[in-house]
Amino acid sequence: MKKSSITFLISLFLFTFAAFSKQEKKVSSSLFEQPLLITSAGQSAEVQLASVLAKRAGLESTLSKLAGPADLENIKTLVLVLGVSMKGLGAAGLDLDKEKERITTMIKEAEKKKIPILFLHLGGEARRGQLSDELITSFLSYGRMVIVVKSGNKDKLFNQICKENNIPLIEVERTVEALAPFKEAFK
């Protein structure tokens, strides 16, 4: 009796592990195509980090901090880098309402053209706050996948929104660790 119970438990474990492994591969394997357009959602400096990650991943990308709907021509993936910087908004001649309007028009055009959206939050805890949270809650549900630096998700806001909208969420300890899942997400 004990032997069959142990065999059953081992079989159950292996089945569960196999199912989990398949699910993990499904989450991170080739959700997106190239070329990609990287733009800011909040005018933070992390948009530059996203561009560096794309280059290191060998992805064909364009960085445009103030991209508009016309910039989506011949683009297969839109990457929105979340994080509000008041200094960045000021330098771009924008306020939060104008930035939200720009992002909204980008998302509408992406939906119209069936361009999937990958959200990145690379600034960690320092790039969270009321204004960033406003953008996160307004736009994250439009994403096909989210990669976030763990310290920027201490309150689990990303988990909540991703779970409600069935969006794969990948947390990494440090920005540099976002390279592997970012690269794996592309065909």
Image (tube, rainbow, N blue to C red):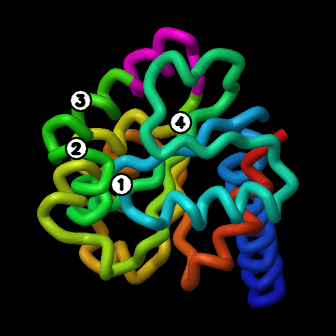
Magenta extent: 106-115
Q: Marks 2 and 1: CB-CB under 8 Å?
A: yes
Q: Which mark is first along the chain, 1 or 2?
A: 1
Q: Secondary structure at mark 3?
A: helix
In this view, the mark in front (4 or 3): 3
> Closest to the observer: 71 or 137?
71
Q: Which mark is first along the chain, 4 or 2?
A: 2
Question: Residue visible at 23% across and 29% down?
Answer: 101
> Closest to the observer: 176 or 170?
176
Whether residue 112 appears in magenta in the rendering, the answer is: yes
Q: Mark 4 to mark 1: distance in Å?
A: 17 Å
In this view, the mark in front (3 or 2): 2
Crowd tier of the residue under label 4, counting other residues whose Cα lies within 10 Å: few below 14, some 14–19, many 20 or above: many
| Left or right placement of residue 91 versus residue 31 in this view | left
Residue 75, given in percent of the width and then of the height, sits at 68, 24
> Closest to the observer: 106 or 112?
106
Q: Marks 3 and 1: CB-CB under 8 Å?
A: no
Q: Amino acid at mark 1?
A: Gln
According to the picture, the residue beneath numbered tag 1 turns out to be: 43
Which disc is residue 117 wearing?
4
Q: Which is the main secondary structure of the residues drawn in magenta?
A: helix
Q: Mark 3 to mark 1: distance in Å?
A: 13 Å
Q: Which mark is first along the chain, 2 or 3?
A: 2
| Left or right placement of residue 116 versus residue 156 in this view | right
According to the picture, the residue beneath numbered tag 3 turns out to be: 101
Q: Secondary structure at mark 4?
A: strand
Q: Is residue 133 visible?
A: yes
